[in-house]
Image (cartoon, rainbow, N blue to C red):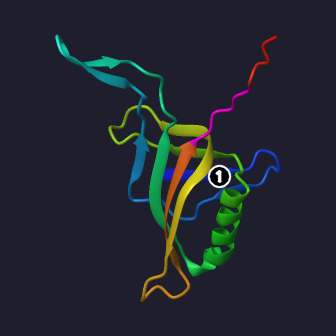
Amino acid sequence: MYLFVLKDEKSGLTQTLPLNSDALKVSVGANHEQDYLISIGEIVNPGYAKCKTIAFSGWFPVTAQPRNIMDIWERHMKERKVLRLIIVGASLTGGDRFEINLPVVFDKLKFTEKGGEPGGIFYDVIFKEYRSFSLKVIK
């Protein structure tokens, strides 16, 4: 059982997602450089870590006002808003507690209405980890 929370740290607004996802996908990668040398074959130069992606699906029942949530999420994406994604739950193996607590931006959104679920909205969402950066002026 997981708790999904989306928090706007600037405004202090917090949104708890009303229903759990049946699957949570976290992707971690790196930007390795690959080359091919005649005398050795393929070589790899280890690169830096890519930003994590977190994907899940779920649905909003009509009582959760899904149209309002869709509008808010689309606005966050258009405004390039950085949010904090918090996912907390028990480990599947019964060990340590599972937790994600990252600054993120919306990467992809998909909303679907299905027959037999009047007013409810099914969604697929992908978040991308946000890393702040600044440029240094060299004189």
Tell me which corner region of the image, top left, top right, bottom left or bottom right, holds residue 73: bottom right
Tell me which corner region of the image, top left, top right, bottom left or bottom right, holds residue 116: bottom left
Q: Which residue is mark 1?
A: 6
Task: Tell me: residue 135, above or below residue 82.
Answer: above
Main SS category, magenta section:
loop
Q: Left or right: 7 with respect to 44? A: right
Query: Is 89 within the magenta?
Result: no
Q: Left or right: 99 with respect to 116? A: right
**Residue sitting at 80 percent across and 49 percent down?**
12
Residue 84 percent across, percent down from the top left:
66, 44
Return the residue nearer the eye: 41 or 80.
Answer: 41
Return the residue nearer the eye: 48 or 19.
Answer: 48
Q: Left or right: 99 with respect to 23? A: right
**Residue sitting at 69 percent across and 60 percent down?**
78
Residue 23 percent across, percent down from the top left:
38, 55
Residue 101 percent across, percent down from the top left:
59, 38
The C terminus lies in quadrant: top right
* The residue stretch that appears in magenta: 129-134
Q: Residue furthest front?
A: 38
Task: Tell me: residue 136, above or below residue 67.
Answer: above
Instruction: Report the number of numbered marks.
Output: 1
Return the residue nearer the eye: 63 or 102.
Answer: 102
